[in-house]
Image (spheres, helix red, strand yellow):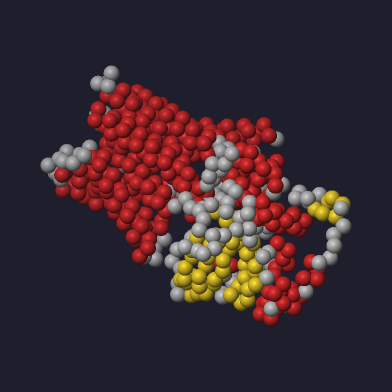
Amino acid sequence: MLDDFFIRALVAGIGIAFVAGPLGCFVVWRRLSYFGDTLAHSALLGVTIAYSLEFNIAVSIFLISSVIALILIQLQKKTNLPSDALLGLLAHSSLAVGLVVIGFLTFIRFDIMGLLFGDILAVSKKDLVTIWVGGSLILLVLRLIWRPLFASTVNYELAEAEGLKPDRAKAVFTILLAAIIAISIKLVGVLLITGMLIIPTAMARNLSDNPQKMVFFSIIGGLLSVVIGLFSSLEFNTPSGPSIITAALALFIISLLKIKQTIKLKN
Amino acid sequence: MSLNNNILIKLNNAGYRHKNKWLVRDVSFIIEKGKIVTLIGPNGSGKSTIAKIALGIHKKIDGEVEKYTDKIGYVPQKISIDWTLPLRVHDFMLLTENIEDEAVNEALSSTGVINLKDKNLGNLSGGEFQRVLLARAISKKPELLVLDEPVQGVDFTGEIALYELIKKISDELNCGILLVSHDLHTVMSATDHVVCLNGHVCCSGSPIDVAKNNEYKALFGEKAAQILTRYEHNHDHVHTIDGDIKKN
């Protein structure tokens, strides 16, 4: 069954949706969407390094994203630039450096479109193992740091005062973010991974009145986006990443209609 | 280790600098089980800073803090919750610790907001939110409670009832309380020890001693010192938590 490329893409996408839902909620709650974007942009550099050194792609992306996160923390401490400027600096320079390096590596054929926007044909059986094993690990670790991370998202000082060690939870969360980017780049692509994290979550916010519900609905939203997106990618021969994100956008718009209805009911 | 095992927390010449400017310095006091220590002082005198030093939120401090408990409940002075996060009162109560439903209900009832349990945190008024914050801190049955202006925004009758509740909690749970307030007047009856701050310790001692102290009078004015007499009159009725009047 897994010999069919479409089934592989589907299984990969479903795995990614399960992880992207809960992580995406924290990205939205903690206002990290631009941070996630920066990590994702740097992933391209990770891919080039992996190819030129014949190294595992997921591991390489994970390492580069983590390094970028560390550099960001250092720059925040040592410069007077605002965070969003630093994020822009890192996002675009790492993307640019990645593309320049690709230009130099003429002996390897890169599918740049595939890297940037995802490729439904690119998912191998090995990638499935990476996604499902890596994804389970990410969820397990997130479960372990859930309380301190959530409490400090609501209020940092409360969490710190009552002994939950929020700084440690925040550092671990950054690593998890780098990890999900590493496992989902092949299917969704560098430029659209953040969309996978935040659009189903944004939809879920419209439907939820408590955090558990929001996590649940963002997983559902992610699953639907993946399934609808991949089927239309197959049908219309469009790149997989944009198709998934467009499906997510459609779901978000539908969720807005639902809000209007509830407001009408209340009046 | 401490000689007295009733001690929960001890500050030795604690101080905090921000960008080479002292916010507060040389503050020492002890909080014991069942005792209420009140920090008073004008705006910017370093009261909240001292509370944060005691809690370990400010880490690069001068002097030292010895803490003998981990069971801490905190009511911060300011809290801003991002409304992208859907959160009900009930979820908020379980924020830092899993607490049994019974204890949650009990705490919410004692601060008079049990009817808000399923409400969204974003829809509460300032006073209601303050009562929820206090309920959350006490529902953990902490050994040390740090309350930074816990009744701000609460109506006057509610304010007195909440201070009575705080006194009751300190007796029932035998927990130590660090109370931050900008005015001695309302906290007078409950306090065991008062530390009057203005960037450093102006004076400290029992509430009556502090109110008579000249430095205190200089900070707060002669009027403030007269509150003692005002506090000693008799009531012919009491106010319940939700503001109802009950005749004696």
**Looking at the figure, which quarter contains the C terminus of chain A?**
top right
Say left or right for B241 vs B24: right
Residue A74 in view: yes
Which residue is situated farthest in the left direction here? Answer: A107
Q: Which residue: 69% across, 42% down?
A: B114
Return the residue nearer the eye: A130 or B175: B175
Q: In this view, does B75 lie above or below B18?
A: above
Q: Is residue A243 left or right of B185 when viewed as pictured? A: left
Q: Position of residue B102 (x, y in %)?
A: 63, 38
Q: Where is residue B212 in the image (x, y as percent from the top left)?
A: 72, 77
Image location of residue A114, percent across then percent down: 27, 36
- Between residue A201 and residue B181, name the one nearer to us: B181
Q: Horizontally, is A97 left or right of A159 in the view?
A: left
Quarter of the picture containing the N terminus of chain A is top left
Q: Is residue A37 visible?
A: no
Q: Which residue lies furthest to the front in this view?
A: B3
On the image, the x and y values in percent for residue A116 come to 30, 40
Foreground: A173 or A8? A173
Residue furthest out toward the top: A1
Q: In which quarter of the image is residue B118?
A: top right
Q: Relative to B228, say whether A65 is above or below.
A: above
Q: Residue at x 37, y 29 (%)?
A: A14
Residue A30 located left or right of residue B211: left
Residue at x 62%, y 67% (from the top left corner): B39
Q: Residue at x 58, y 75 (%)?
A: B201
